[in-house]
Every structure is written in structure tokens, then in C-alpha cells.
Image (spheres, helix red, strand yellow):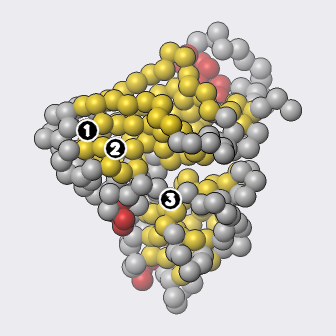
């Protein structure tokens, strides 16, 4: 990777993005979060593929860090490995690769996670034959991430700002797969120790997508939970994308 070089925001929009992607913008990185409900929603739901399991599901956030369990509903995935990314109990970035047992198809980890915002299959060509659940490794089996068959990775319009970082929201996109639904797309922030509040709402109908570029980015402090949701009047599938620039906090 090229050595970090100091660039300034006045260069140009595309040049700045390339510098960030190359790791050349000191103290800055890019996060692209993309999700899909994976099934039809009628009502309100977080835009993530776990809706396929929990119905019109609002995502559940943990209050205590736990170890994780991975399991597929297809025995052809037995022995597969998965890379899970998220935050530990101190909101620091962590990841863990968990291998499932070739006999039981279940794998458990040792790293504790407070947040999970991405998982992907790292074996079998990256294609899972079954639906893969990543849950808490306890009696609750709380679903934290879900990989639908053949997708190879999660689709989650969810992110939590790591400790020592500030996030800047630069773009939102939402889409639906039906033309007969009146749909609202919402973006929520729950700041650390605070109450959830809405930061964006857009309405659409006729299957038309929504896009919004922030001329001045919205700023989110470390440890804030960020999430896209949909509210629909008729059954439809929904996708959501948001882009963040992460900037290191001054030390």
C-alpha cells in the first residue's frame, strides 16, 4: 500500500475519495454499508437480511459483550469458515474467523463482541449453500448477523462508530422491489448513553429509489449506533446504502 501522504479537502471530490481508499489520507477511512431485507416487509423493519428470520424485525443491540456461535441450516456448509467483524466491549474494532465443525456444522468463537456489523464466508469459494446464522453463544441465541444462501456475506445497513473515531455521513440510498408500495426510508442514530433520534426521512412510491448526498456531512461521535429502517404500506423488499468517512479523534 502507498505510504500515507497528507492531502487536503480542497483537492477535488474524486481525488480525495481515491486518497482515502488508498490509505493516503492520514487518519481517515471509508465505510460503505449496504443492506437488504432479504424478504418482503409490510410495516417497519431495520434494513438487514435478518428480517428473513425475524419477520418485520428491528435490530437488537447487545448491552454486554459475548462470544459468538455460527451455524448453517445446510450440511454442505459443515466445516466452513467465516470472518466476523465488529466491536469489543470497549468499542474497539475486532474480527474473528470462526470454523464450523465438519460433523455438527456449528462453530463457536473466543473473541467477545458487543457489536457485529459484517460477516462473510472465507472458504468454499465464498458461497454458502445454506442460510448462516451468527448468534450469541448463550441461552438467548440472539441473532446478530445472517448470511442468506448463496450471498457469501451479510447485507446490513447497520454500523457502530468505533472508539477513537468520528463518523461523517456523506450519502444515503434506498430502493424497493415493488411499484405499489408507499415507502419511507429513515436513518437513525443512537449516541452512546443517549436516546435514539432520527436524522433523515425520505418518502417514495412507484418503486422509485431515493438518493441524498450531504453537501455538509452529518457528524456522529464515537460509539454511536447508526441504522437504516424502512416503513412501508405494502409488502416489498427494501435495500439501503450509506457511506461514512471515519476520522481519527485527536489524541
Q: Residue at x 76, y 39 (%)?
A: 164
Q: Residue at x 76, y 53 (%)?
A: 90
Question: Which residue is nearer to you in this view: 121 or 244?
Answer: 244
Q: Earlier in the sequence, mark 1 or mark 3?
A: 3
Q: Residue at x 48, y 44 (%)?
A: 227
Q: Is residue 85 left or right of residue 123?
A: right
Q: Is residue 4 left or right of residue 168?
A: right
Numbered tag placed on residue 163 in the rendering: none
> Is residue 21 something that shows in the picture?
no
Q: Earlier in the sequence, mark 2 or mark 1?
A: 1
Q: Is residue 196 left or right of residue 85?
A: left
Query: Rounded to the nearest whole Å, what is the CA distance between mark 2 and mark 1?
Result: 7 Å
Q: Are marks 1 and 3 in contact (CB under 8 Å)?
A: no
Query: Rounded to the nearest whole Å, what is the CA distance between mark 1 and mark 3?
Result: 23 Å
The residue carrying mark 3 is: 60
Query: Rounded to the nearest whole Å, what is the CA distance between mark 2 and mark 3?
Result: 16 Å
Q: Residue at x 46, y 51 (%)?
A: 156
The residue carrying mark 2 is: 230
Residue 85 appears in which quarter of the rendering? bottom right
Q: Is residue 243 above or below residue 193?
A: above
Q: Are marks 2 and 1 in contact (CB under 8 Å)?
A: yes
Q: Is residue 35 above or below residue 150?
A: above
Considering every residue shown, the one lying at the far top of the view is 10
Q: Are marks 2 and 3 in contact (CB under 8 Å)?
A: no
Counting from the top left corner in percent of width and height, residue 155 is at: 44, 52
Q: Earlier in the sequence, mark 2 or mark 3?
A: 3
The residue carrying mark 1 is: 183
> Is residue 115 something that shows in the picture?
yes
Question: Which residue is nearer to you in this view: 77 or 31?
Answer: 31
Q: Is residue 155 above or below residue 226?
A: below
Counting from the top left corner in percent of width and height, residue 151 is at: 40, 59
Amino acid at each position: 500500500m502507498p505510504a500515507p501522504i497528507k492531502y487536503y479537502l480542497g483537492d477535488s471530490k474524486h481525488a480525495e475519495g481515491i486518497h482515502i481508499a488508498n490509505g493516503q489520507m492520514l487518519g481517515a477511512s471509508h465505510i460503505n454499508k449496504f443492506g437488504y431485507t432479504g424478504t418482503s416487509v409490510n410495516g417497519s423493519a431495520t434494513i438487514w437480511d435478518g428480517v428473513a428470520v425475524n419477520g418485520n424485525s428491528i435490530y437488537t443491540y447487545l448491552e454486554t459483550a459475548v462470544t459468538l456461535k455460527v451455524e448453517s441450516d445446510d450440511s454442505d456448509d459443515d466445516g466452513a469458515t467465516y470472518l466476523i467483524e465488529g466491536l469489543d466491549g470497549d468499542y474497539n474494532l475486532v474480527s474473528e474467523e470462526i470454523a464450523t465443525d465438519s460433523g455438527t456444522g456449528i462453530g463457536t468463537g473466543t473473541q467477545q463482541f458487543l457489536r457485529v456489523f459484517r460477516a462473510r464466508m472465507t472458504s468454499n469459494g465464498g458461497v454458502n449453500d445454506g442460510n448462516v446464522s451468527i448468534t450469541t453463544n448463550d441461552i438467548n441465541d440472539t441473532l446478530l448477523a445472517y448470511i442468506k444462501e448463496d450471498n457469501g456475506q451479510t447485507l446490513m445497513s447497520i454500523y457502530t462508530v468505533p472508539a477513537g473515531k468520528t463518523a461523517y455521513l456523506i450519502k444515503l440510498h434506498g430502493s424497493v422491489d415493488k411499484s405499489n408500495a408507499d415507502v419511507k426510508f429513515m436513518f437513525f442514530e443512537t449516541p452512546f448513553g443517549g436516546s435514539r433520534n432520527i436524522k433523515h426521512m425520505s418518502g417514495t412510491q412507484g418503486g422509485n429509489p431515493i438518493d441524498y448526498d450531504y453537501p455538509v456531512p452529518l457528524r456522529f461521535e464515537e460509539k454511536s449506533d447508526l441504522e437504516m429502517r424502512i416503513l412501508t404500506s405494502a409488502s416489498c423488499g427494501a435495500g439501503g446504502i450509506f457511506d461514512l468517512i471515519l476520522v481519527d479523534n485527536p489524541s
